[in-house]
Image (tube, grey):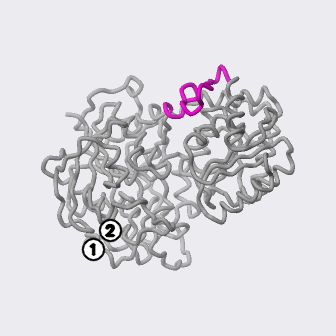
Amino acid sequence: MTLRVLAVTSEAFPLAKTGGLGDAVSGLALAIKQSGIHVTLLLPAYPSTLAHVIRKTEVATLTGLPGGDATLLGAYCPELGLDVLLLRNAALYDRDGYYVAADGSEYPDNAMRYAALAHAAARIAQGVERVQRPHIVHAHDWHAALTPLLMHQMQVQDVKTVLTLHNVAFQGVFPIDLADSLGISEPYRTGDGMEFWGQLNFLKAGIRYADLITVVSRNYAREILTPQFGCGLEGALAARGGDLISIPNGIDTTLWNPLADPYLRGRAFSADHLSNKALCKRDLQHAMGLNEDPHAVVMGMGSRLTTQKMADLAAEAIPASLDAHPSLQVCVLGQGDHKLEAALLAIGQRYPGRCSVYIGFDERRAHLLHAGADILLHGSRFEPFGLTPLYSMRYGTIPVASRVGGMVDTITDPGKNLPAGAMRGATGVLFEGEQPQDMVHAIDRALALHADPDLWHAMQVNGMRSDFSWAKTAPAYLSAYQALRPDVALDRVPERRRGLALVRSGQGAVIPASAGTLPGRLGAKTGKVPRPEAPGLSSVVRHRPYSA
């Protein structure tokens, strides 16, 4: 019997994507499928999702869901090679945006939309005719986090649940008076359930009731147990410390491959043959309207232009760095906060030929940025994993990044006060602090390292030869799944997984040794703190204390 996993998510590339969540879900699904597990994706039937599947068949009508009756479609995604279940309710999902309207405001019925998805997952776990029951339901982020609570409410005990925390700052917090319409029973509306300062918190529901909780990097798993990064849920997370493990994300090393990247148009290069990277720099300069100077040091910045990504700091640090370093060029690719977009565009106008800003997203420019830039600027106030620096390292572009979250695990930086020779084993530059000058000093340091060609080349090669593939991290998920369902075997087990050691955390959760461990149960109390104002109708919560 093959182990069956139902992955419940709001995004999975190419079916639906707004950021790293979509990449992570599809990357993991493909990796565990190749390891002998049958994976089915469950997500809403957005218009974009329907465009990427074939063999659509109505397999069930699910009545009484939040938002009304819905149709469950079975389909196949040829780009992923995976079976897909799609929840179709035009009133909920037939929209241009996934979460927000054209003006940037959140859809007011997001609670209903993603409660319906969770109810559908719980029904499938309970048993739906013509649909195979999964052995494990794997919920991703707040959009699917209500699923473990609903399965507990429905007393579905033989199907186990996993919740992956991609970003605890996004929690799905909604008015408690929606509980009836969302199908949440009275016992689950308290502090012991999903109540959060008088409101309902989807992510807390998953943390409270999932059998196993995974976090996408080791350092972020430690950070979220603190008030600074736990966003009000640090107590709830500490209370489940024995069932919380860190398993790093991976990246798609086929899509991001300097040896076979179609966007580079014949400029392939590798760690052993880097000469074409100079041609990629010229292409990037041309595409972004920079002076085509082979001696310039090009620093790229490709991210959402938000305060989380320190775009506000970059708007001050970039002109300071351009003034201090005449050989520096900067190109920015991204979109986000309109005020930050305008501030960065103004810098581009102030430094023509040396600074270029492209508002929006363009796939070719994104690949060119990683391939052609010398330095990647990637500040972040919190970063659960950090995909973009890994892409840059694949292409020999050195990241300058904040010392937070997953970037602490993936970017090697011995430290700024050590002799330059100590950096021969490094892959990037990490900085602490949230002031513009902290970023400026980090850029200064990177440019000083770049002035030593041998040292810079060693750092490039280190990054390019690092293994961040899903093949490396997927075995930890396989072990976690089998620990939850030891009665179900895999069809085949990769050589690299044989003999994978398992250890136990403080309260008995089985943890793959390669994933690292966390402290055991730390207790739910985090000390007395002022009661904050109740959050509004929003899926985003930051720095609010937990109360059970």
| Amino acid bearing label 1 | Ser
Report how far apart the C-alphas of labels 2 and 1 lie in the structure.
Answer: 8 Å
Asked where in the image residue 488 lies, by quadrant, the reply is top left
Q: Position of residue 22 (x, y in %)?
A: 44, 48
Whether residue 506 can be seen here: no
**Quadrant the N terminus occupies:** top left
Q: Position of residue 229 (x, y in %)?
A: 56, 60
Q: Residue at x 85, y 45 (%)?
A: 325
Q: Is 270 a magenta residue? A: yes
Whether residue 105 can be seen here: yes
The vertical placement of 89 against 273, above or below, is: below
Q: Which residue is mark 2?
A: 112
| Amino acid bearing label 2 | Met
Q: Residue at x 16, y 52 (%)?
A: 128
Specify the principal SS of the magenta part: loop
Q: Secondary structure at mark 1?
A: helix
Q: Give the camera-side residue of 496 and 260.
A: 260
Single out the residue that lies furthest toward the top: 272
The vertical placement of 53 against 470, above or below, is: below
Q: Which residue is mark 1?
A: 181
Q: Is residue 128 left or right of residue 52?
A: left
Q: Is residue 436 left or right of residue 462?
A: right
Q: Residue at x 69, y 51 (%)?
A: 357
Residues rendered magenta in the picture: 253-274
Q: Position of residue 503 (x, y in %)?
A: 42, 39
Q: Position of residue 110 (x, y in %)?
A: 38, 67
